[in-house]
Each structure stands twice: as structure tokens, then as C-alpha cells.
């Protein structure tokens, strides 16, 4: 499959992009989407934020207390910024609707690079499989991109109402934004819900499964969901002991460079630092120990690449 592809991004530039899995995970006892209107708002917010942060949505699934989205982005930073913007914008929606201002405070956002064919296929299948969390069949769940895939009749062209034709007042009421959407190709169905095929990159998902729907369905049915949840959701949010963290970083080194971590050059180790900081629950001292760099080096790299995050980083 072609993992990295050229695409025209929302800002109009044509660039090489790669896939990322973005998860927005709420508290176990906090229901972020309480009714159909919340689910509808979340899907529209995903689209608006993708446009703002210059990423392309491949596929998504929104369930009661979390969301999973696969996006194409030029940089990991763009994928992470997209997730953070989704959190910010949905927090505003939730606060206005329910008067609860802190429910999103502990909602965590992670953007993981899908840096191998195995990761891409399993992540795409895992995202859509999340419909089972809401007790629905994957092919019947209304709040995912499933029905856009392998379905030429749902390409979104000529169907429904163009979002670009909405008035400003309609944009605010139906799309929950004051952004001008005159340039988008999104369409609304008869219930004013977004048609997934009008904004999902169906071609990317289909080529990932060799344009074979049976291959795609087999991947969903044969997947180990516990393994994928651990890799994509739980592990990035769990502070690992040094030995396990080293093993995790070594796996990244092998995928990225086909080299053991111990054999990497300083330049390659430095390239890993911002990625590990954004995608793992770790500390400056642990990164320094694992990569064999000085703590001040790690802090300097993070200040340059990420800015000041998580308060003090040194």
C-alpha cells in the first residue's frame, strides 16, 4: 500500500502527507455525547477543526465518551493540533449546552503516527469497530465514516445540500461555526447531518485494503481489539517503567530507521524527542536516560519543537 501520499490540503497546498491516529479520550464516568445532537455536533466539529488545522479526515468514529479519527497530515504537530482544537471546540459546545465547564478538563488527546502498513490497516479497522462500544453493528452505526467506504453510490457528489451554499446564520445554527465555509465540498443529508463521503478520504482507506471490501471486513472481524486499544489508546497515556519505555522506543527506532535504538546517531535520536513527548506519557529525565542525552538537551529540543507544554519540562 502507499502509506505516504500527495494530497491537496484544506489550505490549498499540495503536499506529501502521512496517516495519524488521533484519539480524544474522556473520563470513564463522563458521557461526552449524551444525545444525537451531541454526536452530530462532534462530527461537524471534527470537520471544522480538520479544515482549520490543515489535515484531511480518512475515517472516524464518535462514541459516548471518546472519539477516534484517522487523518492525513504533513506533520505530527498538525495532527496533534487538530485533536487539541477538537477538544477546545467541543468543550465550548458542551459548556453552552449543559452548563458544565470542566468536563473536558481531563479529556486527553493523543496523535500517533501510523508508521507501518500493519499499523495503518489495523488502526483504520479498529476505529470503525468502535461502533460496538455503543452496542451497534459496524455497518449500521450512524456516527462513523463506515458507510462512505466501498460504496460508489454514496460519494456525496450531487447528493444532499451543499454546506458551501449555507447562509452565515445557517452555518452558525447547523455547523456551529462562524467560519466561512464557501470553499468546502461537504454536503448535508435530509436531516442536516454531514454525509461522510463528502469529507472522508475514501480512496486512502480503500487503497490501504487493496480496494477489496472483503479484505477490509476480514480485518475488522479478525482484529484483536484489546491489542489495538493498548497500542493506540492506553499505552500512550500510561507512564511506563524505564525498561518497558526503552522497549517501546526501540520499536519506534526499528520502524523509523530499521536500526536498534543503541545504534542511532545523535541527529536521529534528536528527531525522536518531540514525537515521543507528544505520543507517550514520559518525562525529561526518562527521555534523557532512554536516549542517552543530557536533560538540558531534551529540554532545549522540546522548547524549540513544542514550546512550553506540561508546565515546566526541565
Image (tube, helix red, strand yellow):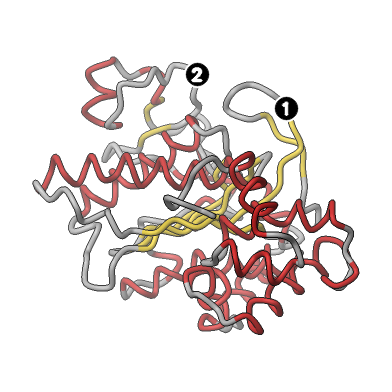
Q: In which quarter of the image is the N terminus?
A: bottom right
Q: Nearer the viewer, residue 57 or 205?
A: 57
Query: Residue 275: which quarter of the image?
Result: bottom right
What kind of element bears circle 2? Answer: loop
- Mark 1 vs mark 2: in front: 1
Q: Which residue is drawn at 68% across and 29% down?
A: 8
Disc 1 crowd rating (10 Å Cα; few below 14, some 14-19, many 20+) is few
Query: Residue 300: which quarter of the image?
Result: top right
Q: In which quarter of the image is the C terminus?
A: bottom right
Disc 2 crowd rating (10 Å Cα; few below 14, some 14-19, many 20+) is few
Tags 1 and 2 in contact by the CB under 8 Å rule? no
Q: In this view, does 257 lie above or below 46?
A: below
Separation of disc 1 and disc 2 at Cα?
16 Å
Q: Residue 271's x, y, as percent?
A: 76, 51
Residue 183 badge: 2
Q: In this view, does 16 lie above or below 221?
A: above
Q: Mark 1 points at which residue?
A: 14
Report whether 6 appears left or right of 99. Answer: right
Q: Residue 222's x, y, as percent?
A: 61, 83
Q: Which residue is drawn at 46% across and 59% down?
A: 23
Q: Earlier in the sequence, mark 1 or mark 2?
A: 1
Q: Residue at x 28, y 36 (%)?
A: 192
Amino acid at each position: 500500500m502507499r502509506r505516504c501520499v500527495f494530497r491537496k490540503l484544506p489550505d490549498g497546498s499540495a503536499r506529501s502527507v502521512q496517516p495519524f491516529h488521533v484519539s480524544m479520550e474522556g473520563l470513564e464516568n463522563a458521557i461526552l455525547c449524551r444525545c444525537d445532537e451531541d454526536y452530530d455536533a462532534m462530527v461537524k466539529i471534527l470537520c471544522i477543526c480538520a479544515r482549520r488545522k490543515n489535515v484531511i479526515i480518512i475515517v472516524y468514529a464518535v462514541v459516548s465518551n471518546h472519539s477516534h479519527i484517522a487523518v492525513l497530515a504533513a506533520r505530527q504537530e498538525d495532527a496533534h493540533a487538530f485533536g487539541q482544537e477538537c477538544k477546545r471546540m467541543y468543550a465550548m459546545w458542551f459548556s453552552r449546552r449543559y452548563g458544565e465547564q470542566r468536563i473536558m478538563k481531563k479529556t486527553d488527546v493523543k496523535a500517533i503516527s501510523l508508521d507501518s502498513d500493519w499499523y495503518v490497516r489495523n488502526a483504520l479497522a479498529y476505529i470503525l469497530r468502535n461502533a460496538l462500544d455503543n452496542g451497534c453493528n459496524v455497518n449500521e452505526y450512524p456516527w462513523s465514516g463506515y458507510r462512505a467506504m466501498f460504496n460508489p453510490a454514496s460519494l456525496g457528489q450531487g447528493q444532499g445540500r451543499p454546506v458551501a451554499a449555507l447562509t452565515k446564520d445557517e452555518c452558525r445554527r447547523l455547523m456551529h461555526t462562524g467560519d466561512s465555509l464557501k470553499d468546502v465540498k461537504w454536503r448535508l443529508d435530509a436531516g442536516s447531518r454531514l454525509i461522510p463521503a463528502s469529507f472522508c478520504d475514501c480512496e486512502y482507506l480503500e487503497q490501504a485494503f487493496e480496494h477489496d471490501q472483503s479484505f477490509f471486513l476480514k480485518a475488522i472481524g479478525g482484529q484483536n481489539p484489546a491489542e489495538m486499544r493498548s497500542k493506540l489508546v492506553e499505552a500512550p497515556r500510561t507512564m511506563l517503567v524505564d525498561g518497558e519505555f526503552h522497549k517501546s522506543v526501540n520499536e519506534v527506532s526499528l520502524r523509523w530507521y530499521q536500526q536498534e535504538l543503541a545504534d542511532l546517531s545523535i541527529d536521529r535520536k534528536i528527531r525522536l524527542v518531540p514525537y515521543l513527548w507528544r505520543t507517550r506519557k514520559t518525562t525529561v529525565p526518562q527521555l534523557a536516560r532512554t536516549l542517552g542525552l543530557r536533560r538540558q538537551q531534551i529540554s532545549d529540543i522540546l522548547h524549540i519543537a513544542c514550546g512550553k507544554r506540561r508546565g515546566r519540562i526541565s
